[in-house]
Image (tube, helix red, strand yellow):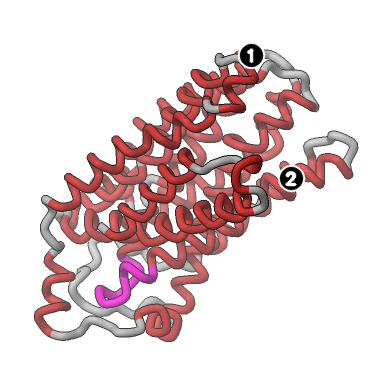
Amino acid sequence: MLTLFLMGAATVAVGLLPGYQTLGIWAPILLVTLRFLQGFAVGGEWGGAVTMVVESSPRHRRGFYGSLPQMGVPLGLVLSSTLFAAVSALPDDDLLAWGWRIPFLLSIALIAVGLFLRSHITEPPAFVQIKETGQARKLPAKEVFRRHGKAIALTVGMYVSAGVPFYIVSVFVLSYGSSQLGLSRNVLLTGILISAVVEAMTVPCFGALSDRLGRRPVFLTAAAFTLLLAFPFFWLLTTGQTSLTWLAMLLALAVAHAGMYGPTAALYAELFDADVRYTGTSIGYQLGGVVAGCVPLIAGALVGAAGGAAWPIASIWAAAALIGLTCALATQETRGRDLHTDHDTGD
């Protein structure tokens, strides 16, 4: 509840924040602070959400139910792309004066729904057992690194392999495609929107598939496909054809990213013991997010140094996929694991 409220309050506060003309230097300082609070809250919110869902799910359906919170990423991308397109239709002066605040202020409705749902959910059995037996850890972060250091490293690596292509497609390509390739920004935004809609449907499919085949086989196959797609993705973009641009985005988000992201919630939760599961999943996911989130900035610098060529970015994409493949190969199969007992994760 606290992380959800903090995230919502920080987001709405961004929309209400006075500009530089009113607050001076404090305006950017407060903006950075609010963005930090958003990220801090998200770090705890994702781990708590997927841990609660996975622990409350039937053993043979954890992959599917765990993938349902994962749908929030593509659905959020759909919502943000739609709102961005809507406010971008405003005159430039209005957009800069007040239009940009609208998406931030509208988030209050989503937070209200989230708080209502969270207040009516009971604790999962594994967590109840820990509280009743007095096994809750006072310093779970220290404990998770001591007992599950290898699992943390593996989860970070697996997130990087999914996160790097995602950020390249959803963030970097908007700038690269319009400035370097001459593609229409509307074409790129529409491609992201279409791909995100389809991904919202494929993520639970891959989660359900991991219930049948296992977490590792599904993740490994998707990571291998991501590796093979690294250079062809940019070849398709450079054709300048709308249909091929959309195909590239669709393959990257709805197949490659969804194939790795779908089983992630169940896989991460099953790697950690119950008393540190929340902390372990959150740390692995967010450390991976820090690494992957830096890629658009790095990509922009590399493209400039390479004279607009895409091969450095494709190489980063391929390297991330190789990291994910290596980490998945080093990870034990977790499907069907008892979440109430401790396990040897190979540390």
- 33 over 68 or under it: above or below: below
Where, quadrant-wise, is the C terminus in this rendering? bottom left
Magenta stretch holds residue 271 = yes
Mark 1–mark 2 distance (CA, rounded to whole Å): 23 Å
Query: Which residue appears at 64% of the width and 14% of the height?
Result: 242
Query: Which residue appears at 32% of the width and 67% of the height?
Result: 278
From the viewer's side, name the closer residue of 193 and 63.
193
Q: Which mark is residue 299?
A: 2
Q: Secondary structure at mark 2?
A: helix
Query: Which residue appears at 46% of the width and 65% of the height?
Result: 284
Q: Give the residue type at disc 2.
A: Ala
Where, quadrant-wise, is the N terminus in this rendering? bottom left
286 relative to 336 in the view: left or right: right
Tell me which label, 1 or 2, sits earlier in the chain. 1
Coordinates of residue 61 in the picture (x, y in percent): 20, 50
Q: Secondary structure at mark 1?
A: helix
Which span is picked out in magenta?
A: 270-280
183 relative to 226 in the view: left or right: right
202 relative to 22 in the view: left or right: left
Q: Give the residue type at disc 1.
A: Thr
Q: Main secondary structure of the magenta part?
A: helix
Tell me how many marks there are.
2
Residue 244 showing in the rendered view: no
Residue wearing tag 1: 242
Number of other residues with Cα within 10 Å of mark 1, as a class: few under 14, some 14 to 19, many 20 or more: some
Q: Are marks 1 and 2 in contact (CB under 8 Å)?
A: no
